[in-house]
Image (tube, grey):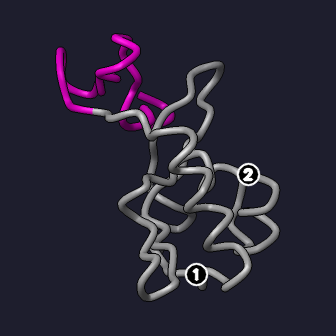
């Protein structure tokens, strides 16, 4: 699904990995791009989008049903804040995921 979504929306790879299902508006046919996944060293973490510029991209008539079908087949994994500050907990996988990238130089 990611290649289709990337080609159909022009989203960057990190934006695709950071996309949450509630950021897809099927009724208005738009994707709200609010965060990305970045690698800091070998740690994947959520971070603001490039230049801190959240934006919307159109969701085409041909891509919307493919994405909806993908969401139905592969249910999203709920992420909830838990444990020490700065970590997210995947409720279905029971493992921690960093929520923000550390600042460089700290």
* Left or right: 25 as drawn, with respect to 83: right
Quickly name the residue at label 2: 1
Residue 58 lies, with reference to residue 34, above or below; the image says: below
Dot 1, how many residues are within 10 Å of its Cα: few (below 14), some (14-19), or many (20+)? some
Q: In the image, is residue 19 part of the stretch drawn in magenta?
A: no
Q: Position of residue 67 (x, y in %)?
A: 62, 61
Type of secondary structure dominating the magenta stretch: loop
Location of the C terminus by quadrant is top left
Q: Are marks 2 and 1 in contact (CB under 8 Å)?
A: no
Q: In the image, is residue 105 part of the stretch drawn in magenta?
A: yes
Residue at x-position 31% and y-position 33%: 79
Looking at the rendered structure, the secondary structure element under dot 2 is loop
Instruction: State the mark number for residue 102.
Output: none
Residue at x-position 64% and y-position 22%: 41
Q: Position of residue 93 (x, y in %)?
A: 40, 14
Looking at the rendered structure, the secondary structure element under dot 1 is strand
Question: Looking at this view, is 104 or 53 the one in front?
Answer: 53
Q: Position of residue 53 (x, y in %)?
A: 47, 74
Residue numbers of the magenta segment: 80-106
* Left or right: 8 as drawn, with respect to 57: right
Residue 41 lies, with reference to residue 6, above or below; the image says: above
Residue at x-position 68% and y-position 66%: 11
Which of marks 1 and 2 precedes in the sequence? Answer: 2
Dot 2, how many residues are within 10 Å of its Cα: few (below 14), some (14-19), or many (20+)? few
- Quadrant hosting residue 43: top right
Residue at x-position 65% and y-position 19%: 42
Distance from the alpha carbon under mark 2 to that under mark 1: 17 Å
- Quadrant hosting residue 39: top right
Q: Position of residue 96 (x, y in %)?
A: 36, 16
Quickly name the residue at label 1: 57
Residue 22 lies, with reference to residue 61, above or below; the image says: above
* Left or right: 70 as drawn, with respect to 77: right
């Amino acid at each position: 699904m990611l290649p289709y979504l990337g080609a159909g929306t022009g989203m960057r790879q990190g934006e695709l990995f950071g996309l949450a299902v509630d950021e897809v508006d099927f009724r208005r046919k738009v994707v709200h791009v609010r965060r990305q996944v970045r690698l800091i060293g070998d740690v994947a973490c959520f971070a603001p989008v490039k230049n801190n510029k959240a934006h919307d991209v159109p969701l085409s008539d041909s891509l919307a049903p493919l994405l909806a079908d993908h969401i139905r087949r592969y249910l999203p994994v709920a992420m909830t804040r838990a444990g020490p500050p700065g970590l997210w907990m995947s409720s279905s996988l029971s493992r921690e995921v960093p929520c923000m990238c550390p600042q460089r130089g700290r």
